[in-house]
Image (spheres, rainbow, N blue to C red):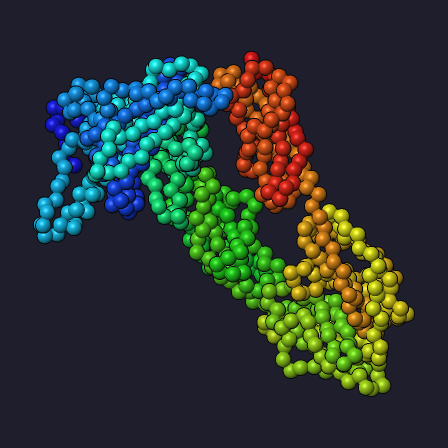
Amino acid sequence: MQLISKKVFSMKKRNSIYLFVNACVLLLCATTLITAQEAEHARVAQIKLLARASKDSIVLRWAPTTAGGWRIANAIGYTVERMSIDKQTGIEITKYQLLIERPLKPMALEEWKHYAGHSNDFSAIAAQAVYGKLFKPQAGKQGGFAELRAAADELLNRHSFALFAADNDAVTANALGLRFVDKQIRSGERYVYRVYVAKPTTEYTFDTAYVMIDAIDTPPADPPLGFRFESGDGIIKLYWDELDVQHFSGYYVYRSNDGKNYTRLNSTTLIIPTTTQDDVNTYPKFVDTATTNYKKYTYRLVGITPFAEISRPAEIVAFSRDLTAPPAPTLQKPKQLSVTRIKLTWEQSQLPADLKGFVVARSYSPTEEYEILTKQPLPSRQREYTDVLDEYDAAYYAVAAIDTAGNHAFSLPTYIAIVDSVPPPMPKGLRGKVEKNGIVTLWWQPVKKRNILGYRVLRANNPTHDFTQVTGHIHPDTLFVDSVDIRVLTKKIYYKVATVDKHYQHSALSEMVALQKPDVLPPSTPVFRDVFVTDSTVRLSWNLSASSDVAKQLLLRREENSTRWITLDTLTAKKTEYIDKRVKQNIRYLYSLVCIDSAGLRSEETLPVTARPFDSGQREPATNLVANYNRKTKTVILTWNYSPKKKENFWFVIYKSTDGKSFREYESVKAGMRSFTDLTPLKGKNIYGIVVVTAGGGQSEMANTFVNVQ
């Protein structure tokens, strides 16, 4: 883009503005190029119109939506008209009245120079976009399509530059013919304005833009939302939310070292690029790289509206912090001092000034689940540590250096295997049962040592006989299935189990279990009688099995969407009622019963009954709600505590009442917040209430408090 004569406008700051704007606007143009070119091809343009009222005037701002339309409208100019509307009935009071003597269009260059002055950088940008040397492709020249594309791109860039400058400077908007101030208004009246291209043209089709507004004083725009920070090492990253309902043309960021005096950090307007890709989220961001770690800074963020006005500031206090970890220590090969005691030694080649000490970690996997063994960091001068493995046969160790900021760096893990000559413990809790088809199921408690290879199962028909091994291999599980002949005179079968470790050392044999061989008939099935459901329990009652040899009952349960039954509880033979407290709301459960007789025979499962605990919707209220009035900022700050008892989506609803009036819903606050600032409290007694609301329809009682505003 060729610059206008250096004598016309000041060049002191223009280079930085041009470079910054060029980068941002070209990005905007690139993301919207296809849509804009389609509109240009159709040669149709809309005129977007905005209005803002103040004490004594109404400001109008408009712009055509396409670059080609903007170029044509610049040559013709715009007409601005106004009509009065009755606020009660909506009926026209006056017809449309012409507000300008001649169409508004960009000022002539000489008039523009005199009007804008030599130091207005935004006017320099806009004047360059309007009057700078144009690229015109030569018809019939080889490569003409590429030149036409380049010309279209350039016009689109000029259009974007001009609108950017108009958004940031009212003088520039006036000079571009895209702004009008109506001072012939009456306070409290309602007006409809329309703006259109002054005369028809065969080159382009334009619509007419309308806007309705009340002539009442409008406060400055609300501050940008979601102003927050992220601490870095020597830097602070500032973020905020860019919302369609609160759109700003650009932003300014200010910083204060003392909370009183502020300096603007960005010399040019900060623009947030947009993207047309749905899967890419572009969040506004500003990075302050000139910070001292742990020093608190106060930041203010203001937005620039399309009327070149500044919003109210959003403010936060932020700090950067040390994120640089110390050098990692070098761990030597561990030494075994005894059967279970391990000695670790390490070296630290560099000793940074902020080194706090060392922590020792252990795992039984080289890459995950490391357990910190030192509750407090070891002193920075210590270089050894002794651990007890608790009969584990192998482990991985790592040592980390940690600084005063909590940053740490781990050494490479080192492995050690214990030399083990002690036999493993024998299994406990051996139990079993014999089915009517001769299938024997045995189970026992696992031996909790990491070097266990498995178990050997032994069997005898008489407890005084020698026990022989059932299979020749080592069984890896604590559940074992065997088969016996039940068509014999002996009524019992006897089993023992031994533990085998990875060194093939065998434990002593477990206590013997004697299993009764089955009789012929299983017990009859019980029948459910009643099911009663509350929001946290399911109460079941049933009629007992008619069989007299029932030894126990198994209560089974599964969820509706599952096919797997679990044993909820084992009950005595005479138990006829059970309360299930291990339930969740809104989940449908199925229950069934099985009887087991003294021989271990199981009855058929009862026909299942269903139950679904309900959600009462009642939630715990927020606590410790406190309201404090800040006389300096004239705001009320609410704080409260709340700890949800269940995982669900929820939020807070703030209610407000002033001077005895009824409560009204005032604001919604996200679940992660525990404070809220009322920027517009009224004088008098302000009563605030807070209610917890869940996505599933739950709600708490209202907690309330009050504060007097002077």
Which one is nearer the viewer's eye here, 581 or 693? 693
Which one is nearer the viewer's eye here, 267 or 328? 267
Q: Position of residue 288 (x, y in %)?
A: 35, 33
Q: Position of residue 224 (x, y in %)?
A: 42, 30
644 shown above or below 115: below
* Image label count: 0
Horizontal arrangement in the rendering, residue 546 relative to residue 446 (left or right): right
135 shown above or below 527: above
Horizontal arrangement in the rendering, residue 430 relative to residue 49 (left or right): right
The residue under the point 61% across, 69% down is 452
- Specify the quadrant of the image occupied by residue 155: top left
The residue under the point 73% across, 81% down is 483
The residue under the point 42% across, 19% down is 93
250 shown above or below 588: above
The answer, for residue 702, to whether it is visible in the render is yes
- Specify the quadrant of the image occupied by residue 617: top right
- Specify the quadrant of the image occupied by residue 96: top left
Q: Position of residue 423 (x, y in %)?
A: 65, 70
The residue under the point 77% across, 74% down is 433
Horizontal arrangement in the rendering, residue 333 relative to residue 565 (left or right): left
